[in-house]
Image (spheres, rainbow, N blue to C red):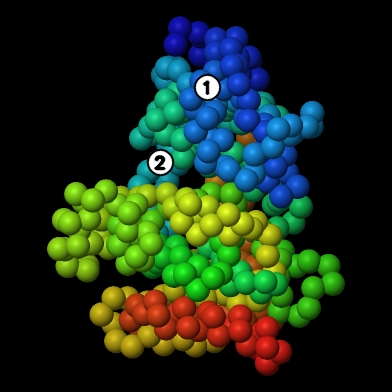
Amino acid sequence: MSESTPTSVRAFAETLRRRYPVVDSLGLRLADVRVVVRSNDQRHIDELRAYFGEFVVDDAGDDAIEIFAFEGDEPDLSGLDLTVRPPEPGKSSIKEAYIDLDDGRIIRKLKTGVVFLAGGGVHVAVGPCRAHPNQIVNFVNNRFIEVRMREGSLLCHAAAVAKGDRGLVLAGFSGMGKSTLALHLMEEGLDYVSNDRLLIRRAPGAPEGELLSCGVPKLPRINPGTALSIPRLRPIVPEELRVRYDALPVGELWAIEEKYDVDVDTFYGIGKIRLIAPVQTLMILNWRRDAGPCEIRPIKLEERPELLAVVMKTAGLFYEERAGSLPAEPDPARYIELLRGFHVVELAGGVDFPAAVAYGCARLGAAEAGEPG
């Protein structure tokens, strides 16, 4: 880009709007949060429309959160002194660099070159957006997450599934299989709530030990090991790769860092996605392959800070907490207080998805039958 070094997020956004005229818009209703995505690329809007499916609306309303996703050249930010954001605990990949200006923040994704502008009502993405649609989906979802957090919900690094008015929260260290367990539970008829981010709060008048969860509208992303372990999902992996992967030892198969989106409507049927669900049980995966039998035991998170840390999730660079500062780290005391009285279990020992599914279904079944929790 030839424009001078940006000194204002709002002015930079206006420059991009003039450079990339909008050709189409997409309205979304995410629970009670309304969003409109505008782009200069018709194909990108069509792909986002297919992705968000049942959340698409004809008219999001005049007061919807307005997001621009411009397909174009990666902006030249060489004149800006960007700060590289260190990886989150338990992660090794460095993904983002950013700079805070007086009226907002500019964020550059280091691997893809997509640049985001956020702050003061500005929500803009620019660069190779169509080649990296997952980053635009995340940008939309970050707006949704911010609204929920401002209302008092806590953000968790967790998946969730539900049956009727009962639900399970699934958390675990990176690579422990929370998405895999969620899909195995869906094989038993449960609904999909969320894959990797979950917002929870105590609803007014809710019974003791029950919280209200709000999922994030993002499809499950799974590795080949998960896809090949569930018969209906095997077609997600291209046939030529299936033959090769089926011959791999289990450890090598599950170590493949390749991701596939699971279209829930296609594989599980229309109506299997719900964003809002009461939840009563938190299952924390802390198991290892070939580590003996699986042990499922109740715990108190205030006594297990290392497991509490697995549940907590920082809002990240896209959360506008206050001008010129990063979001505060999650407060353990708030999570402990919210989860007090909530049924929490640790799954330790060896990986055993059938045992975890049986336990999760029993929790839901016992509750429905009126048995003690």
Can you tell which quarter of the image residue 197 is in?
Answer: bottom right
Dot 1 crowding, Cα within 10 Å, few <14, some 14–19, many 20+: some
Q: Quadrant of the N terminus?
A: top left
Tell me the amino acid under the disc marked 2. Answer: Lys
Q: Image check: 128 left or right of 14?
A: left
- Tell me the tag on residue 42: 1
Closer to viewer: mark 2 or mark 1 = 1
Q: Residue at x 49, y 88 (%)?
A: 297
Query: Farthest residue toward the bottom?
Result: 372
Q: Quadrant of the C terminus?
A: bottom right
Residue 118: tell me if it is visible: yes
Can you tell which quarter of the image residue 324 is in?
Answer: top right
Q: Residue at x 58, y 80 (%)?
A: 344
Tell me the amino acid under the disc marked 1. Answer: Gln
Q: Image check: 157 left or right of 26?
A: left
Give whichever of 60, 149 is nearer the camera. Answer: 60
Q: Give the image location of residue 177, x and y in percent.
A: 40, 66
Q: Residues under labels 2 and 1: Cα distance?
A: 28 Å
Q: Give the image location of residue 334, x and y in percent.
A: 68, 66
Q: Image check: 170 left or right of 57?
A: left
Q: Secondary structure at mark 1?
A: helix
Q: Residue at x 48, y 21 (%)?
A: 71
Q: Secondary structure at mark 2?
A: loop
The residue labelled by disc 2 is 95
Q: Give the image location of residue 62, x and y in percent.
A: 79, 28
Give whichever of 321, 148 is nearer the camera. Answer: 148
Dot 2 crowding, Cα within 10 Å, few <14, some 14–19, many 20+: some
Q: Image check: 95 left or right of 198?
A: left
Please say if 42 is above or below 177.
above
Give whichever of 147, 213 is nearer the camera. Answer: 213
Please say if 10 is above or below 198.
above
Q: Residue at x 37, y 50 (%)?
A: 260
